[in-house]
Image (cartoon, coloured by chain):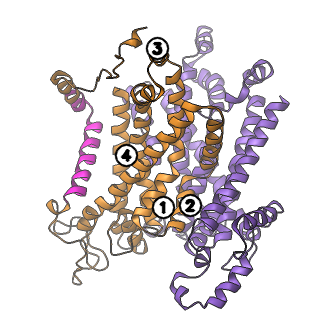
Amino acid sequence: MTALAPSPAGDLPTPSRLPAGRLRRAAAGLLRQPALLAAWVIVLLMIAWAIAPGLFTSASPYTSDPSVPFAAPSLEHLFGTDRLGRDLFARTVYGTSTTLTATLIAVLVAFTFGSVIGLVSGYFGGLIDLVTMRIIDVFLSIPSLLLAMVIVSVLGYSTQNIALAVGIASIASFARVMRSEVLSVVQSDYVQAAYGLGVGRFRVVASHVLPNSLSSVLALAALEFGTSVLAVASLGFLGYGAPPPEPEWGLLVAEGRDFVAQYPWISIIPGILIAALVISTHRVSTSIRRSH
Amino acid sequence: MIRYVLLKVGRALFVVWAAFTLTFVLLYVFPADPIDLLFDPAELRTVSQETRDQVAALYGFDKPVPLQYVDRLWHALQGDFGSSVQTGTPVVQAIVDVLPSTLVLSAGALVLAVIIAFAIALAATLTRRPWLRNLIESIPPATVSVPVFLLGIVMIHIFSFTLGWFPSFGDGNGIGLVLPLITLAIPVSGPIAQLLVRSFETEAAAPYVTTSQAKGASRPWIIVKDIVRNASLPAFTIAGITFGNLIAGSVIIETIFSRGGLGRLTQTSINTLDIPVVQGIVVFVAASFAAINLLVDFLYPVIDPRLRASLATGPRPTALAGAPA
């Protein structure tokens, strides 16, 4: 019964408080894995682009320069220019925050609602669980891109609605993971022990069930980040997001589509960045999951 | 056994009914005024109240919602999902018309994806160099991380415009099918390959492999004779996910290659807010998904004798479909 260790007051031992030695070891480990290091660099760079785009480019994403339409990538225009002579590097850098914010909202929506639904379903069981799980089956039987498209068509076209739609479309998978975690935690000795000590239902859920079930759901959230970037960009590519002058990654790819024959970089460079971000987040989240 | 069959069939039917209900709520009840959705947003202001009333009566929007629901469900049960707002074609007909094109594309892509997945898993299992194995194992996650639209555009750029081998328009089932097929197969192969790599690994550590080795069987022989056969079965458990990937992929690929099909119909019907068609497609996709999972549930015990035994004796056969519950 070592699981009794968390005191009835409910403060769990937090292993996440990193001593300096562990931090140094993590850094040394990172140096031994160049791929992981590169993934971290890409993720952090793109977060920086999203937060302070002005630091990385002096060009504006909207001003067109009719004298240089379709310029190839060069030192002056790192990613080249589009048909209106707008600097594509600036458009990409400024577009990062649109894409990343939408992704973040999507993951938060899916995480929050999915966890709550999974918690309620797994904890109370019985009829509530049965009904919830059947409804979740239905959501899982519709491909999430299709579901997101339907939701966006009802909500109206905008980046926020894309974010909401992608989030709603992935609630089901979060709820399912949360539910199965809760089911196993509720059975565990320390939860039974807490009941035995006379701790109330609400306290048990708040201080034992929730914190112990969340880790797998958080791991899923990290993985889902990459998938959501893809979904957001795909919907943007299909034209359900921000209207054209707005720089959004999926839209940037779509705008260059008509010129692929002669000026392939217009859509291929932003496309490669999307792929790089998705691969990097995937790599980073897998490594985080492994180390826990 | 009969209980098991009934339970599974019941669940599949429930999914189809619930998909119908969900889309009804989303498309007909949720919007403040569903009639608005029937008109082109640009022309909305010019539409007179009289026309709106006529349209409302035509589509049954003047009736109370529960009545509309019962009415639509009753018709849907008879295979009538209404008619397309844009073209007037019955929804079922519209879907049947474009289905063959998507079926050819998806079936071809699926075959190719399975071949790619097996090649990756075999290569990862056969190699004895850890760095090469790591490299091969990093391919599947990469294939699902690259946006499908980027793949399509790169394919068109290289093979249509630079090399001129294939047309960039993918209509028809001839040479135009090659690029869309490869583009769709790549992301679909990812999850299958990932699963196969993992299951090859588990099987390679199984006691019967050690026995084979002790009896003097060579490594390639063991892999082909024992591991491949036993490790391939779990691939059926992600049939549903694969189906979803094929559908989602075809939406984007049919758009990029200007190819007619279910994906393109989905996109145009959503762009024009053709509600009956959208509902028809979603219900059709959910029904196909349910049917595929049902088929896997029933076929799996037939293919894997171990499960047949547990099904006959075990009290709880529900977990066998392997979908991580």
Residue A42 in the image: above or below residue A191: below
- Disc 1 residue type (three-letter): Gly
Circle 2 residues within 10 Å: few <14, some 14–19, many ≥20: many
In the picture of the structure, the residue carrying the numbered disc 1 is B152
Task: Name the mark nearer the viewer: 4 or 3.
Answer: 3
Residue at 40% of width from left, 37% of height from top? A218
Q: Residue A53: x, y in percent?
A: 20, 61
The three-letter amino acid code for the residue at tag 3 is: Ala
Q: Which residues are magenta?
A: A28-52
**Do the residues at pointers 4 and 3 share their chain?**
yes
The residue lying toward the viewer, choosing from A22 and B74, is B74
Q: Are marks 3 and 2 in contact (CB under 8 Å)?
A: no
Q: Quick one: SS at disc 2?
A: helix
> Residue sitting at 71 percent across and 45 percent down?
B292
Q: Secondary structure at mark 4?
A: helix
Amino acid type at circle 2 is Pro
Query: Dot 1 falls on which chain?
Result: B
Residue A86 pos. (x, y %): 25, 75
Dominant secondary structure (helix, strand or loop) of the stretch shown in magenta: helix
Front: mark 3 or 1: 3
Marks 2 & 1 on one chain: yes
| Residue A35 screen position, x and y as percent | 29, 38
Chain B image colour: purple
Query: Does A50 appear in magenta?
Result: yes
Marks 2,1: beta carbons within 8 A: yes
Per the image, label 3 sits on a secondary structure element best described as helix
Q: Which mark is residue B180?
A: 2
Measure the alpha-carbon separation of dots 4 and 2: 23 Å
- Residue A279 tag number: 4
Q: Secondary structure at mark 1?
A: helix
